[in-house]
Image: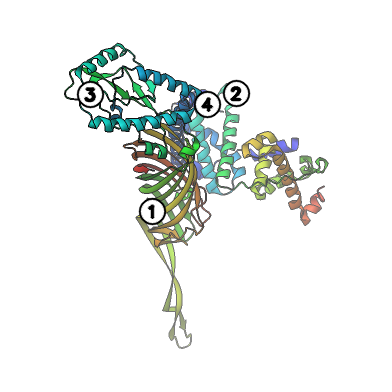
Amino acid sequence: MAYYNKLRDNLRKEDDLPSDMSWEEMSDGIFQKMGKKEKKRRVIFWWFVPMLIVSGFVGYYLMTSTNEPNIEIPKDIKENMVKEDNGQNIIASEKALISDRQKGDDAVILTKVMNINAKANQLINQKESSNEGSKGAKIAAQNEHNEDSNISESVTLINSDLSNQVPENTKIIDPLINVSNITNAKDMIKVELITSIIRPNIRSNSETLLPVLEVKSIIPLQKDSKTYLGSMDISLTSGVIFWKIGSSANLKLNTEQHKATISEKELPGYHIALHNEVRMSKYFFLKTSLDYQKWYSEFYYSGTKINSLEVDNVIVKVEENLLSGEKSLIRGKASIYETVDRTLRHRNEQNSVLLSLSPGYQWEHNKWSFKTSAGLFFTLSKFGNGKTLWNDEIVAYDGVMPQYNDKMQIGYLSSLNVKYAISNRYYVQSMIGYHKFISNINAENTISKPSIFNISLGIGVQF
Amino acid sequence: MIANSTISQCVKGDQQAYSLLYCTCAPYIFTIIKNYFTPEDDRKDAMQEVFAQIFLSIQNFDEAKGSFKSWISKITVYQCIAILRKKDKLQISYHLEVVEEENYDTLESLEKLSVSDLEKMLVDMPLGYKTIFLLSVIDEYSHKEIGELLGISPETSRSQLFRAIKWIKSNIINDINIMRYGILQ
């Protein structure tokens, strides 16, 4: 071991630091790197926090939810059924339905829902052709109903015995579900009535308050995965992007002929993306996106270059005849050197079209949906214009940057988005996304694997 | 190596303390870095990375767990490995050769070489071998620790070390060295 101790001591022998490693020379670089490291920590933090929040929501939802999806019926539908049967038939039917629900017999429940709807349609038609009934009957019905009006909790109603007799002052507008819609609908629904809500009669001749059996929220039929399979969202988003070019952003040349500092500073850009999400189940979907991104950067060059130039027909030699003293000039080709100092700033732009495929998870709450997805992307096309250093020269390009190779570039992406339904079909959404190239976008051996962070807003439609 | 008050000042972000810490520790850190990196630019970049990391995490230094010197030495080695991995320079062969244990070359077999010759060999050694050799022999990490550091198995680390020894032996065989050492066996 003494041998290796000696080797260790030799290798660890402290010499004077090289002169270019003094604190004065190094401090700027150190502070710059500290800033980068801190920024990286912050980025990780800002990714971690939203992910934690989303996970919290998802976890909470999974812990508290039943298997029954709860879909809100629009308000205008809720105030549609008015009955005057004192709640007797209703309550009996509700009990029967609750019993069915407890048994979990969805087929029976669905049949009942459909029956109700059919009857409701019948009632509407009948109601429209009927005359107003006697006031006495209304008042009696109202009084009796009032006795039951302290039932404050919402109950589930599937009233299979919905009376064919249309009470006076009762207006039933087709409210809930169209039977034909039910069979097509992806969301099966049930009807929930709140028996205690009493409202002024919507009819103008009413002198009393009549109970409004409010259709509340319910749609408790259980959906299975097949119900969601194939439903689709198409959306368009646009927003700002921030990007980092990778570690080749700064370059120092220090050869005899060429001493220069070259850098490329990233500037914000924008993107427009078209997304298509296909639901695989209640929670999972597969997202395909076509994303057009425009990045900007500031190319900076400052340096000194010694150019070698070939010149022809210049005097390269003078021959002197020592006897006669005559001089003759020999002309020919010669190299001359010129030193060029140059400082240049130029705004470059780079366009990319990316195709991505990412599975995702979503969670819905009322009109809100929270989605997260992660996957891979491929560069379909890239073009741009600007200036760059290529073969030791600054060249202007219009099209593909000369360093860019022809290989298909790939990377991974992740995104978080929140969507809000503004109607049954349309929604608005906000999204944050992160793209990271995992293959070099640069043909040289320098590492250039940009990271792209985007924040965007958009609209969408669901089918 | 460095006064506690300087460390406290560094925790507060005092630039003078940073400067003092740098001037005190840089020569030692440089001795570690120069073994991992040969080009001057790489060494300079590594020095900056290491000190940036030291300044950012100095509040985590706990005297009870070890000396300041061993703490900065650990940070330096970690940063060197991180830089090498980031630049994809650390190409370690992950093939696990089934080698009979008795056929392993041992470190003792190199002791016939002069220390200065071995130092020279290290400069030319492939980076993957050199990294393992330095981590194992000079920085005294166990194969388990090396495995964790480089993302390889301890067996791969062990196998790479013996390949490194083999490389040294095969490269030392030239006429002069045969005369000086005989063929190393």
Q: Which residue is mark 4?
A: B60
Q: Secondary structure at mark 1?
A: strand
Task: Say if A288 sits above or below A82 in the image.
Answer: below
The amino acid type found where label 4 is placed reads Asn
Residue at image coords 30%, 14%: A149
Q: Secondary structure at mark 3?
A: loop
Task: Say if A365 sits above or below A278 in the image.
Answer: above
**Residues at marks 2 and 3 on the same chain:** no
Q: Which residue is mark 2?
A: B65
The amino acid type found where label 2 is placed reads Lys
Between B60 and B93, the residue placed more toward the observer is B93
Q: Secondary structure at mark 2?
A: helix
Q: Which residue is mark 1?
A: A299
Q: Chain of mark 4?
A: B
The amino acid type found where label 1 is placed reads Phe
Q: Chain of mark 3?
A: A
Residue at image coords 41%, 40%: A184
- Residue A454 screen position, x and y as percent: 39, 43
Q: Nearer the viewer, mark 3 or mark 4?
A: 3
Q: Nearer the viewer, mark 2 or mark 3?
A: 3
Q: Which residue is mark 3?
A: A169
Task: Mark 1: give few (<14), some (14-19) or many (20+) Cα within 10 Å.
Answer: many
